[in-house]
Image (spheres, rainbow, N blue to C red):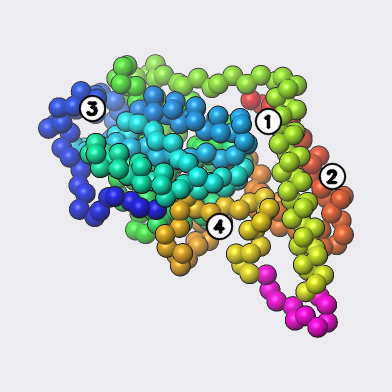
Amino acid sequence: MNIVQTNTITADPIQKTEDAAFTIFHNRRDLHEETIPPFFVYINENAWDEFTKHTNEVYRTTRHEGQGIFIGRYFYDEFGEFAVATSYQEGEGQSSYSTVEMSEQCLMTISKKCRAENLLMLVWIHTHPTFGAFYSGTDVACLKTNFFMPFQIGIVADIIRKEHKGFRVQSREVVEFKDYALYSEKNRELVTIYGSTKLKGAAKHLDIQIKPKESESLSSEAILSELRAIRGELAAITNFLKKEEIRADKAAQPHTPKEPLPANGVLKSEAPQKEEQSAPSTPNETEKKPNVAASPATGRSVNPEDLFFKLQELAKQNMLQLIALIVFGVLVAIVLILKVIF
Ligand SMILES: [Zn+2]
């Protein structure tokens, strides 16, 4: 990934910025309650809508993850530093239902735009449709490698469950970051994302606008399409496990010394969770992959990696068909429960 920013980038004084797009930030007291965090990220609600539109379309048509970058400016005032993301740039590249990559060409295009318009890449955002807002090992590595500047954060959003979580690199470690919100230029106020109220130093106005959840009908068509997607994913798991089984058999033959599977080979093919291998870009192939445990999974998320490894174990005991059936049943139950809840 080619990032244009260098270490020399510093925040601009907001008071000297005459651009009308940023006048709302000239007095941040009007936006926040008591505390204004030392670093805050504001994302234009229209840019967020662009992100939602893009990644929903990606999910609707392919069931894949989607991603992009929010770009904008970096300022400071008497309260601290803050980033203002004014627009969303779609990411393009390889993706699957659980992985996403951004092509070099796409990054170059965004990079060029930033240079031409004196903007910065501020927020790397990607989706985990249906499997929860958490950072995988690959996500952690990507943020550390590509979005580690003080004005940069990462956000992961489950656009189906309406969950989101922010992260930031601090002292070379990826830590959770909550100080971000949408802003309405028109109403001159902060807007929470998906109606979540975890925002620290939230908007001053009690009548804070909540972005309405997109209504999802409980139509049988929607449920059927969910089931179809699950069936496709299950087929990929089954296919992969069969291959693994053959491979294990071969390895067990007397004249073939048994070798451990390469750490990277295991999940490479049709594995359900390939994210460990596919950061949006991996300029530094030797970058050590951080422990997945560093990325907290949400309690409600079905961890595809756990599921996968359990499946792999059991497949070795020739219980493939049975397990596939059980998993399918469980996934169907989860989908139905989620549909009822939301
Ligand atoms: Zn991810």
Q: Earlier in the sequence, mark 3 or mark 2?
A: 3
Indicate which disc, 4 or 2, sits on the residue closer to the N terminus.
Answer: 4
Image marks 4 and 1: residues in contact by CB distance under 8 Å: no
In the rendered view, tell whether residue 105 sits above or below residue 244. Answer: above
Query: Label 3: which residue?
Result: 22
* Gap in angstroms between the C-alphas marked 4 and 1: 29 Å
Residue 37 location, x and y as percent?
30, 39
Q: Nearer the viewer, residue 264 or 158?
A: 264
Q: Would you name the residue on which mark 1 appears? A: 338
Between discs 4 and 1, the one toward the N terminus: 4
Q: For the residue marked with disc 1, what is the amino acid?
A: Leu
Q: Residue at x 34, y 58 (%)?
A: 171
Which mark, residue 325?
Answer: 2
Cβ atoms at labels 4 and 2 below 8 Å apart: no
Does 291 sit above or below residue 31? below
Going by the numbered disc 4, the residue's amino acid type is: Gln
**Residue at point 42%, 59% (across, down):** 283
Query: Mark 3 vs ligand 1: CB under 8 Å?
Result: no
Percent across and percent down for residue 57 are 55, 29
54 lies left or right of 146: right
Give, as a three-letter code, the residue at label 2: Leu
Q: Residue furthest front?
A: 105
